[in-house]
Image (cartoon, grey):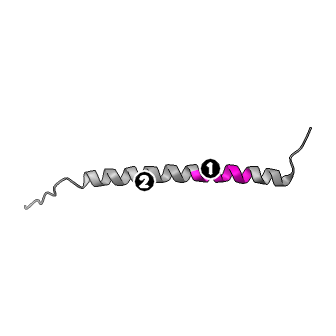
C-alpha cells in the first residue's frame, strides 16, 4: 500500500483549506450585497412624523 508523504498531506490540507475559505468568502460577500440592496429598497418609504 503506497503511503503519502507528510508534505503531500500538508499540500492537500492547504488546498482544501484555501478552497473552503474562498467559497466562504464568496458566499459571505454575495449575501452581504443582497442585504445592502434590500436595505436600499426599504429606505424608499416616506417617514411619518406623528404629532400628538
Task: Report the residue at 44% width, 50% height from top.
Answer: 31
Looking at the image, residue 28 sits to the left or right of residue 16; the answer is left
Badge 1 marks a residue whose secondary structure is helix
- Please give the label number shown on residue 12: none
Q: Is residue 20 shown left or right of residue 35?
A: right
Residue range of the region highlighted in magenta in the rendering = 13-22
Q: Is residue 16 magenta?
A: yes
For the point 67% across and 52% down, the residue is 17
Q: Is residue 42 left or right of residue 15?
A: left
**Distance from label 2 to label 1 (Cα)?**
18 Å
Location of the N terminus (image quadrant): top right
Q: Position of residue 43 (x, y in %)?
A: 24, 55
Image disc number at residue 32: 2
Residue 24 position in % (x across, y down): 55, 51
Instruction: Give the percent coordinates (x, y) of residue 14.
Output: 71, 54
Residue 48 percent location from the top left of the image: 13, 57
Residue 6 is one of the magenta-drawn residues:
no
* Crowding near the residue tagged with mark 2, few <14, some 14–19, many ≥20 C-alpha atoms within 10 Å: few
Number of labels in the image equals: 2
Q: If the image is split into quadrants, where does the C terminus sit?
A: bottom left
Residue 30, compared with residue 52, is above or below; it is above
Q: Main secondary structure of the magenta part?
A: helix
Q: Where, by quadrant of the figure, is residue 10 drawn?
A: bottom right
Q: Residue at x 68, y 49 (%)?
A: 16
CA neighbours of label 1 inside 10 A, class few (<14), some (14 to 19), many (20+): few
State the SS at label 2: helix
Give the residue displayed 12% in from the left and 60% down from the top. Answer: 49
Residue tagged 1: 20
User: Quick one: which residue is furthest to the left in this view?
Assistant: 52
Amino acid at each position: 500500500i503506497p503511503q503519502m508523504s507528510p508534505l503531500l498531506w500538508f499540500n492537500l490540507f492547504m488546498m482544501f483549506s484555501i478552497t473552503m475559505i474562498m467559497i466562504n468568502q464568496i458566499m459571505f460577500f454575495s449575501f452581504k450585497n443582497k442585504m445592502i440592496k434590500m436595505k436600499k429598497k426599504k429606505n424608499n418609504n416616506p417617514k411619518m412624523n406623528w404629532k400628538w
